Amino acid sequence: MSEQRRINAEIRERRYEDGFRVMQGRREYVTYPDNSSFRIWFSDVPWRYENHDHSAIEICLTLDGVVDYMVQDSIYHVRKGEVLILPPDVPHSLTMGEGSSRYLFLFEPETLYGMRDVKSMLQQFNRTFYLHDGSDAHIRIRETLLKAQAVYDRGEVMWNTACYGYIMRAYAVLGQHYLLNPRVRPRDPVNTVDSEVITAAMGYINSHFREELSLDDVAEFSGFSRYYFSRSFKKQTGYSFKDYLCQKRLQVAMDLLIRSNTPMREIAIESGFGSVATFNRVFREKKGCTPTQYRAIYGTY
């Protein structure tokens, strides 16, 4: 066994010391059962989790009572049967009092976000969803989550894949009902031409993120002025050009860190950061740890 693999193995052994929570400041590194990236926690113990964030998607399904969430500046009182879905890297705290119970679903987003239709709507999915309307879609998502929980509890062969299958179903309903149904989620008027151009620009970024890509380059590709493109891109995606490009590069880098033993220098180039120094600096700023630490915690190599 190489020295790096030995160190990674030791880190994985130590990561279970704190009740399956590994904290560095307010950053939580979610730990998972072996050969998985999916965990469900049940609790009926009154407790408060102080403000923290993590790379996992978090879904709360309240079984009894109420779970109170503070998500950035918004408060959600998630009552029995209601569902709260949090995107990755969003600061939040939660409190649960006497007589309450809940399931917390935690899973890494790469598998879900790798689906092409989800990826094309990522800016819309990358927000908090509070499902409490009692609609057919709300009920279907809740029942789908409970099916995933039953599979998780049984621990059968391929349970991780089966759980992700149910998550995919839940997100399909989420997108169809809460994102694409105008009666449920009113939309602001959208300039059709702008929408088509911005979609093409996103495709251009996704194809050229390894290059030294600038706002001017993509604005020129779109045929818009720098100012108009920047404003339209932000309005339709929820991201600035710089943030979208950085997020794309980070997603590629994280996938390589988790699923390969590719050297850091090659990952920096392959993900578009150019140099190891830039890669390390941006990764630490955005993810709260170094690429080496991230691989040690989540990597399969």
Image (cartoon, rainbow, N blue to C red):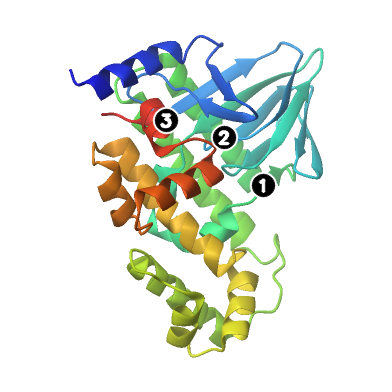
Q: Residues within 10 Å of mark 3 (few under 14, many from 20)?
A: some
Q: Which residue is mark 3?
A: 293
**Location of the C terminus (image quadrant):** top left
Q: Are marks 1 and 3 in contact (CB under 8 Å)?
A: no
Query: Where does the image place residue 62, in percent across and percent down from the top left?
Result: 70, 27
Q: Which residue is mark 2?
A: 54
Q: Is residue 213 left or right of residue 285?
A: left
Query: Where does the image place residue 227, in percent across and percent down from the top left?
Result: 62, 83
- Toward the viewer: 24 or 122? 24
Q: CA distance from mark 3 to mark 2?
A: 14 Å
Task: Name the amino acid type tagged 1.
Answer: Phe
Tell me which corner region of the image, top left, top right, bottom left or bottom right, holds residue 152.
top left
Query: Where does the image place residue 232, in percent across and percent down from the top left?
Result: 61, 78
Viewer-side label of 1, 3: 3
Task: Name the amino acid type tagged 3.
Answer: Gln
Q: Are marks 2 and 1 in contact (CB under 8 Å)?
A: no
Task: Name the amino acid type tagged 2.
Answer: His
Query: Where does the image place residue 289, in percent across and percent down from the top left?
Result: 50, 35
**Is residue 90 placed above or below 182 in the rendered structure?**
above
**Location of the N terminus (image quadrant):** top left
Q: Which residue is mark 1?
A: 129
